[in-house]
Amino acid sequence: MPPHRANPHDDPRNDPRTDLELIDAVNHGDANAFETLYNRHRDYALRLAMRFTGERNLALDAVQDSFVYFYKKFPGFVLTAKLTTFLYPVVKHNALSLKQKARRAQGDTSDEVLKAQAAPRTGLSNAQDTDDLQVLLGNLPGAQHEVLVMRFVDGLSVEEIAQALDIPVGTVKTRTHHAIRKLRESPAAKKYFEP
C-alpha cells in the first residue's frame, strides 16, 4: 500500500504546475518536481517502449533508462517543445537498443528481426478491429507507419513529429500523405475511411 499523504495536493499526480514550471523547479533542485514529471509521462513512455519492444520487461527497462537520461540533463535542461517530443527519440532509442541486445543474447540477429524493430506497434486496444488495423499498418513501410502512429495515435503535430524524428516538416507531411494513400487504396482499409 502506498504511503498515506496528508494533503491530496502532496500527490505528484495532482501537481497543477505545467511541465515548463516543473522543469524550472527541477533546475533549481526540486526533486519532487522531477517525480511529478515522471508520474505524468511514464505511461506515455511505457506505451511507446512497448511499441518498439513488444515485451513488457524490456519496455520497463527502456522507460527507466530514458528517465535516467532525462534526469542527468539537470540542472540546465531547457525544454524547447512538448516533453513528449523530447522523450520520443530517447525512449525509441533505448527500446530498440534493449530489444537488439535481447535478440543478440538469444542468438537471433537476422535482418528480418532487426527490420521489425524499426516499425512501431500501435497502441490500439479493440480486439478484431485492432488486429485488422495493425495488419494494415504493419504493411506500411516503417517510416510511414511511424509518422502515422505518432500523428494519429500519439496526437503529435507535424512539427512535433519532425522535431522528434529530426527530419524536415515536409518529409513528415510526405510520409503521412503516402501512408494514408496506401491505406485508402487497400480494400481491407475501406471500413476505416468510410463515414
Image (spheres, grey):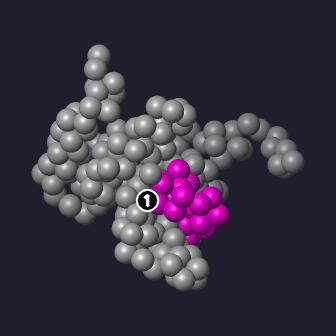
- Dot 1, crowdedness within 10 Å: few (<14), some or many (≥20)? many
Whether residue 52 is situated above or below residue 158 in the rendered picture: below
Camera-side residue of 158 and 176: 176
- Principal SS element in the magenta part? helix
- Residue at 56% across / 70% down in the picture? 65
Magenta residues (range): 46-65
Left or right, 180 with respect to 149, comes to: left
- Residue at 44% across / 46% down in the picture? 122
- Residue at 81% across / 44% down in the picture? 5
Q: Picture coordinates of residue 118 (x, y %)?
A: 37, 64
- Residue at 35% across / 45% down in the picture? 137
- The image quarter containing residue 85 is bottom left
- The image quarter containing residue 183 is top left
Looking at the rendering, in which quadrant would you find the C terminus? top left
Report the residue that reaches farthest toward the top. 195
The residue indicated by pointer 1 is 87
Q: Picture coordinates of residue 194 (x, y %)?
A: 28, 20
Residue 27 in sight from this viewpoint: no
Left or right, 6 with respect to 57, comes to: right
Report the amino acid beneath label 1. Answer: Leu
Camera-side residue of 133 and 167: 133
Q: Picture coordinates of residue 167 (x, y %)?
A: 20, 61
Left or right, 55 with respect to 18, comes to: right
Q: Is residue 186 magenta?
A: no
Residue 108 in sight from this viewpoint: yes
Q: Picture coordinates of residue 46 (x, y %)?
A: 56, 54
Left or right, 94 with respect to 145, comes to: right
Report the residue that reaches farthest toward the front. 187
- The image quarter containing residue 153 is top left
Whether residue 1 is situated above or below residue 112 in the rendered picture: above
Tell me the SS state at disc 1: helix
Camera-side residue of 123 and 63: 123
